[in-house]
Image (cartoon, rainbow, N blue to C red):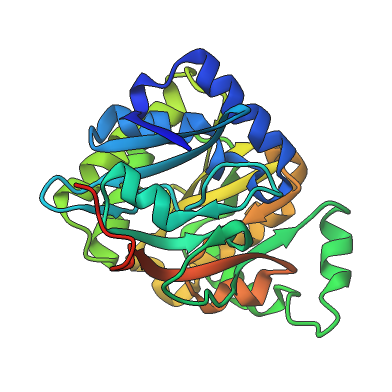
């Protein structure tokens, strides 16, 4: 197998089209998280994003995007690219040790590995878990009916909504928000609540502004906001492609925490499915109680781990 490594921003149009052909052929890789434009866009603001081009006798067969750690031989995860995969045909089997050896990395770290059945690793058996999704293919009413245990009725939020509205004004949801100040407030809340560093905030600001306002990518940015009167309660940002909406950032106003504004905006995102133009809402691989509360389907993943080159394979640095 021939393998070339290039910065992701040097991916040619021909290579990009081949990537898209492969993505369409493999249902596990559908949606914005595996689209080349996501990695290319992140690479505009993060120069250490590379892609290994995997060739066999039939030509360019696969792509392995990763973040090159310049201080070591480790392939790290890429910020805002929540899933990791070798972008390749569904039936293709990859010898990951050989690939890592050829591109000069000793360890491939991942947050949520997808389409892992086709990755052969001599080091360990990979054990599957799940990333939560909401399937709204049949609409919002059918979604509620599908939750036979009755958990998702949103009745518990009704009292909190009445309290907010009586004190702060009517609650209203803005499905398509274009206010850049709201975007900045959302990222500030997120950085404080999750102790994000300044480098994350800078990358998040550049990336989300690009998706929202540049119109230079085939992936759509979906930016929504929830208000009570003039007070911003919560905001959400996701990326959408082929009817799959993947959540990147969602945060709420800490002054309204006791009213569960995070759950309120999720309720509105789900009930506004048609207006937002999606049928699958991908909640992302991070564990959270609300995700299991809302979810009706899953994406199989291998959760946060790494694969190393085995000693007998050696490492050609």
The answer to which image quadrant residue 96 occupies is bottom left
Residue 265 visible (yes or no): no
Picture layout, residue 148 above or below residue 31: below
**Residue positioned 39% across, 29% down in the render:** 41
Q: Nearer the viewer, residue 165 or 252?
A: 252
Image position, residue 281 (x, y; %): 66, 54
Q: Please provide percent x and percent y for residue 219.
A: 56, 30
Residue closest to the eye, 223 or 79: 79
For this orientation, the residue located farthest to the left is 71
Left or right of 115 on screen, residue 100: left
Residue at the extreme top of the image, as rendered: 13
Relative image position of residue 66 (x, y in whole percent): 35, 45
Total count of labels: 0
User: Splitting the image into 4 quarters, where does residue 110 fall?
Assistant: bottom left
| Residue 175 placement (x, y as % from top left) | 60, 41
Tell me which residue sits at (40%, 57%) in the image. 97
**Image point (44%, 30%), residue name:** 211
Q: Is residue 143 left or right of residue 172?
A: right
**In this view, which residue lies farthest toward the bottom?**
149
**Residue nearer the viewer, 115 or 276:** 115
Q: Could you tell whether 134 is left or right of 47 in the image? A: right
Residue 77 in sight here: yes
Q: Is residue 51 above or below residue 168?
A: above
């Amino acid at each position: 197998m021939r393998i070339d490594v290039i910065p992701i921003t040097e991916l040619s149009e021909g290579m990009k089209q081949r990537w898209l052909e492969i993505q369409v052929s493999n249902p596990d890789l559908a949606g914005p998280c595996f689209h080349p434009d996501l990695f290319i866009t992140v690479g505009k603001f993060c120069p250490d994003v590379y892609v290994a081009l995997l060739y066999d006798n039939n030509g360019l067969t696969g792509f392995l995007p990763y973040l090159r750690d310049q201080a070591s031989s480790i392939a790290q995860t890429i910020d805002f690219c929540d899933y990791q995969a070798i972008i390749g045909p569904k039936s293709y089997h990859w010898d990951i040790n050989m690939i890592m050896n050829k591109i000069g990395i000793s360890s491939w770290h991942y947050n949520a590995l997808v389409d892992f059945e086709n990755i052969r690793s001599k080091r360990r058996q990979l054990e599957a878990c799940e990333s939560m999704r909401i399937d709204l293919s049949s609409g919002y009413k059918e979604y509620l009916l599908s939750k036979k245990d009755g958990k998702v009725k949103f009745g518990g939020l009704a009292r909190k909504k009445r309290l907010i509205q009586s004190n702060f004004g009517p609650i209203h949801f803005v499905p398509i928000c274009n206010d850049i100040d709201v975007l900045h407030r959302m990222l500030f809340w997120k950085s404080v609540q999750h102790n994000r560093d300044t480098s994350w905030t800078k990358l998040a600001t550049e990336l989300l502004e690009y998706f929202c306002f540049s119109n230079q990518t085939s992936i759509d940015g979906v930016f929504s906001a929830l208000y009570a009167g003039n007070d911003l309660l919560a905001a959400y940002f996701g990326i959408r492609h082929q009817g799959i909406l993947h959540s990147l950032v969602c945060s709420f106003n800490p002054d309204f925490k006791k009213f569960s504004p995070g759950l309120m905006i999720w309720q509105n995102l789900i009930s506004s499915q048609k207006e937002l133009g999606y049928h699958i809402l991908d909640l992302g691989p991070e564990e959270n109680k609300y995700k299991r509360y809302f979810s009706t389907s899953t994406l199989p993943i291998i959760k946060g781990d790494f694969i190393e080159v085995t000693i007998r394979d050696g490492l050609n640095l």
